[in-house]
Amino acid sequence: MDQKTFIVLLICGVIVLLIALDFNARRKLKESVHQKWGRVPYQPRFDKEKSLKEAWLTEKEFRSWSSEVDDLTWYDLDMFEVFEGINLTYSSIGSEALYQRLRSFNFGKDQRLEKLIAFYKENPQTREKIQYQFARLGKKDGNFTKQYLADGQSKQIGHVGFYTFLGLLPIIGLILLLFGQVLGIYLAIGSLIFNTLYYQVKKQTLETEINSMGYLVSTISTANQVAKIATPVQGELRQNVKPLKDIPKFGFSFRVKSGSEAEILFDYVNMMFMLPFISYHFVISRLEKKTKEAMKVWELLGEMEVAAAVLNYRTYMPITCQPEFTDNGVEAEDLYHPLLKEAVVNPVDWHQNILVTGSNASGKSTYVKSIAINCILAQTIQTALAEKFTLQHGHVLTSMAIEDDLFAGDSYFVSEIKSIKRLLDQVEKGERCYCFVDEILKGTNTIERIASSAAVVRWLADYPSLAFVATHDIELTEILKNECENVHFEEQVTAEKGISFDFKLKQGPAKTRNAIALLKVLNYPEKLVADAKEAATFFDQHRKWEIFD
């Protein structure tokens, strides 16, 4: 076998291998998309909250919404865990769109979301085909594409002529080698090594631009494929992707990934021939005046992925419903918390401020959080975890998981009153707010806590907002009996089982006092238990504490 034949056969063998690896990876990807449907999503590697939040903050620079879930509310309610339970997305476009939707929303029903969900429900094969295209695109945390598009400015990364020259050197070397020039092998090997090293060094300073461009071009390529599939948004997607459809041809090195082993080889080919730098210059000149269309394409693709994720959420959760929007308060049948595996369902009838009382671990906080989370889900993904759920559109704010702020120099109580103040500021604007407070003002002494808490709740009653307050202070139920409705949770204490809970909502203020009984069950000294009972009885009779001798 002569030299020329060997080189040709080697090149053909490599091409066949790459095609085979790519085909196998696509087959596995299709199977994965099919198998994941109807199950709890699992994202072990991607969708870090830092990346998602950065994309959302960028989006806020050029878009506005009726309401926003602020950081305190988001973390009080463990909303990122809720997000992860919904996040059956296959691209960063989808996960960023879902995160954005859960944190910012408009008052009113999103008709396009429901049209897409209904379409996917009726056409599961089409939905699967679309999800496969997004899976090919894949995820890239910190892709900065939103920021790149928002800037709307070309970012040059050097001289295209120089990169083209470096990229041609290995090819020239191979041509010389085919004509029997020994110099060709030295030129080919030397230029390949130089290009690889130069690319790695240069990429360190241009990583943001290359990553952004790479993911953007891959997104447009995906949009071209998805636009061929009949969907409720096909016309709008085609219209906006049309001015961009040729960009993947020029961005030839930023191909849609298949997730195969061959990707490593493709990456080395890119390095050795300087293809990303060359492609970048071809793309940037054609994209500069079409960022508006690119942003719209990004938005439409995100909505398509969100719709599929929401449908999957409705599919695998035990009970879901579409909320009804009224001009009244909040009502629900069999509402539950999304993060509990064996959640107990409870009703909601919330038309005036409510105080919920009961002992620790009886279910107060969980119940309050379940209502708050469902108020958000109902207005963002139009899904509630209940048999029936109705509400009036409004802002959702919480003050629950308060901590000392060491960096700001704030004590627990200062952090707490700041948290409640931001809630009051929003209420004072006169818009409907749903306010959730757990253990209101517990960071101060009993007298001032009760007095201040009562004053806060009474002040809220003058506005078109609703407050749901969890408290241990039974005194508040008496002080505010004309201002608030009372509900409670109870515990049962027995010698056989100790303390147990049924987590079922009951009407009226809490009446049980089982803390002292629990001391007895846990074999505290008899005299200690007797003294505690006596002191509690004395206070009930005289409304003051007996002084110990």
Image (cartoon, rainbow, N blue to C red):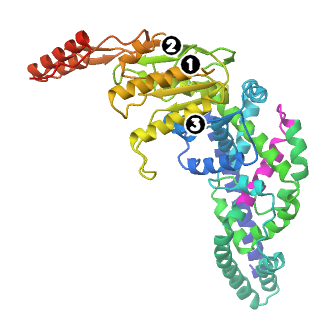
Of circles 3 and 1, which is in front? Answer: 1
Answer whether residue 238 is visible to the viewer in this image.
yes
Where are the magenta residues, as a range?
212-234
Q: Position of residue 14 (x, y in %)?
A: 71, 66
The tag earlier along the polypeptide, 1 or 2, is 1
Q: Which mark is residue 83?
A: 3
Q: Magenta segment, principal secondary structure?
A: helix
Cα distance between the residues tagged 3 and 1: 32 Å
Residue under label 1, please give it.
461
Question: In which quadrant of the rendered image does the N terminus lie?
Answer: bottom right
Q: Which residue shows up at 87% across the image and 64% down it?
A: 285
Q: Position of residue 487 (x, y in %)?
A: 44, 13
Q: Position of residue 268 (x, y in %)?
A: 67, 69
Residue 236 vs 533, above or below: the answer is below
Asked whether the beta carbons under mark 2 and mark 3 sit within 8 Å of each other, the answer is no
Q: Amino acid at mark 2?
A: Glu
Image quarter of residue 476: top left
Callout 2 secondary element: loop
Of circles 2 and 3, which is in front? Answer: 2
Residue 283 vs 50, above or below: the answer is below
Residue 163 vs 306, above or below: the answer is below
Callout 1 secondary element: loop
Q: Amino acid at mark 3?
A: Phe
Cα distance between the residues tagged 2 and 3: 36 Å
Residue 335 vs 280, above or below: the answer is above
